[in-house]
Amino acid sequence: MTDRVAPVASSADVARRMRATRQRDTPAELALRRLLHRRGLRYQVDSRPTPKVKNRADIVFPREMVAVFVDGCFWHGCPEHGTWPKANADWWRRKIEANRQRDRKVVTTLEADGWVAMRMWEHEDLELSADRVEELIRSRRRAASSGSRE
Ligand SMILES: [Zn+2]
């Protein structure tokens, strides 16, 4: 069995809402990218880190093998701001739970392949998030340059 959720309670409205809600280029993503860019970091946007995962990451550093995901509070069920719609509540709950499961699986797959996956909530302080990413990138570079001959 897969964890695919059948949209049993799906109405035309729900389907339209799902299509209309693009998860890329959210304000949080754009702002984080701007901050990272200003720090001199260069990255790929909205791309698959490795063929081993089907999902795209929001920000990808191929050489350092770091994938950053900026998770929307609604779609990924943020414990602080996640809301559960009342209409089609069951369907939404399963949909969001499936998203969360997939999020965890992507992290596991990436890590098994030597990547570091960083997930952050869109509500998090962006400067702090940028700090975390920058620190990680720099430490990966240090590790790569000192560990290559071991
Ligand atoms: Zn949140």
Image: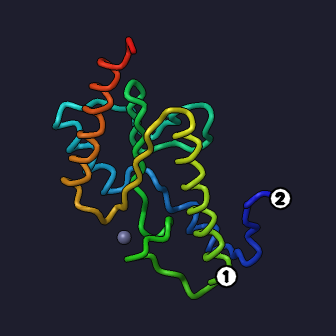
Quadrant of the rendered image containing residue 72: bottom left
Against 33, residue 17 (above or below) is: below
Where residue 129 appears, as percent x and y from the top left, is 26, 52
Where residue 138 appears, as percent x and y from the top left, is 25, 32
- The label shown at residue 1 is 2
* Residue indicated by mark 1: 90
| Viewer-nearest residue: 149 or 120 | 149
Q: Nearer the viewer, mark 1 or mark 2?
A: 2
Where residue 59 appears, as percent x and y from the top left, is 39, 41
Residue lying farthest to the top in this orientation: 149
- The label shown at residue 127 is none
* Residue at x 60% of width, y 67% of height: 16
Q: How far apart are labels 1 and 2 at the CA level? A: 20 Å
Q: Amino acid at mark 2?
A: Met
Q: Is residue 117 left or right of residue 48?
A: left
Taking the image in four quarters, ligand 1 sits in the one at bottom left
